[in-house]
Amino acid sequence: MTIVEALILGLVQGLTEFLPISSSGHLVLGSFILGVKSKDNLLFAIIVHGATVLSTMVVFRKEIMALLAGLFKFRWNEETNYVARLLVSMLPVGIAGLLFEDQIEGFFGGNVVFVALMLLITGLLLTATLFVKNTKGSITFPIAFMIGIVQAIAILPGISRSGATISVSLLLGVEKSKATRFSFLMVMAPIAGAMLLKTMQLLKNPDLALGIGTGALLAGFIVAFLSGLLACNWMIRIVRQGNLFYFAIYCFVVATMVLIAYW
């Protein structure tokens, strides 16, 4: 992977992580178009996902500080209750990552047809939000777990994590701003954990990074972080205005083009 390729893919990741069009799916499609070897994809995907987690922390820094302040009071309060729900939502993706790591890595091998089919599913989920009226509900523990299952499924490239979790939250009656906030905060720990595991693997086997290079990883990380800041703030406004269906159209168009081009 060259630095130019890393810049392009980092930009793709940063813009599509928060928009409901599947960043992992676009990374696979972008890697396929640029001819980046499949063995490089997962490491790079984890690095740039880490960059967008950092941008999430910047955008939601006030909320995160408030949660930490409440958490370190060491008593059951609104903040510890919220953190507990976040932890519950992380259980499914953690279990999936531990039990199916090899299978998950296989999904990043450049199967563009699979990505296209998953984009169609993302489009259907986003379309379903058209039938959601003004919702006022909050995220309970059962809802947090259900959203967590959706996040685990969204490991598949082509299934938008933010699109799927926000759509399902809205379908379950959660208020828009609460659904968006929870969706963005719930992903931070799983991605950070995946980065830690991958870093440990690299320390044991440096050959895993031979196809990428430190310069390319750094370039991708920086671009993903900066573009992620823009996309995160944009997505918050989009959800409030209820315009998710436009992204459903985008998913349908891209999936159709990929399938036509492949066949």
Image (cartoon, helix red, strand yellow):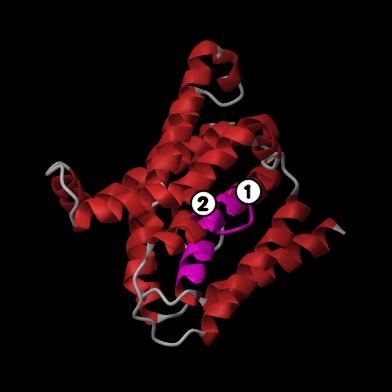
Residue type, mark 1 in image = Gly
Q: Residue at x 45, y 64 (%)?
A: 143
Q: Secondary structure at mark 2?
A: helix
Observer-nearest of 104 and 55: 104
Q: Are marks 1 and 2 in contact (CB under 8 Å)?
A: yes
Q: Main secondary structure of the magenta part?
A: helix
Q: Is residue 37 visible?
A: no
First in sequence: mark 1 or mark 2? 2
* Quadrant assignment for the N terminus: top right
Q: Name the residue that disc number 1 marks.
A: 30
Instruction: Give the distance between the C-alpha atoms of the residues marked 1 and 2, in whole angstroms.
Output: 8 Å
Drawn side of residue 253 relative to residue 219, left or right: right
Numbered label attached to residue 12: 2
Q: Secondary structure at mark 1?
A: helix
Does residue 182 appear left or right of residue 194 in this picture? left
Q: Which quarter of the picture shows residue 257?
A: bottom right
Read off the magenta span.
148-169
**Residue 49 shown left or right of residue 83 in the figure:** right
Q: Mark 2 is on which residue type? A: Val
User: Badge 1, how many Cα within 10 Å: few under 14, some, many 20+?
Assistant: some
**Of residues 26 and 159, the one drawn nearer to the viewer in this rendering:** 159
Which residue is drawn at the image coordinates 53% and 47% (left, top)? Answer: 92
Against 53, is 254 above or below? below
**What residue sits 62% from the left and 31% below the top?**
40
Q: Is residue 56 visible?
A: yes
The C terminus lies in which quarter of the figure?
bottom right
Residue 61 placement (x, y as % from top left): 21, 51
* In the image, residue 151 above or below residue 35: below
- Residue 134 located within the stretch drawn in magenta: no
Residue 70 picture location, percent across and down: 15, 49
- How many numbered circles does the render carry? 2
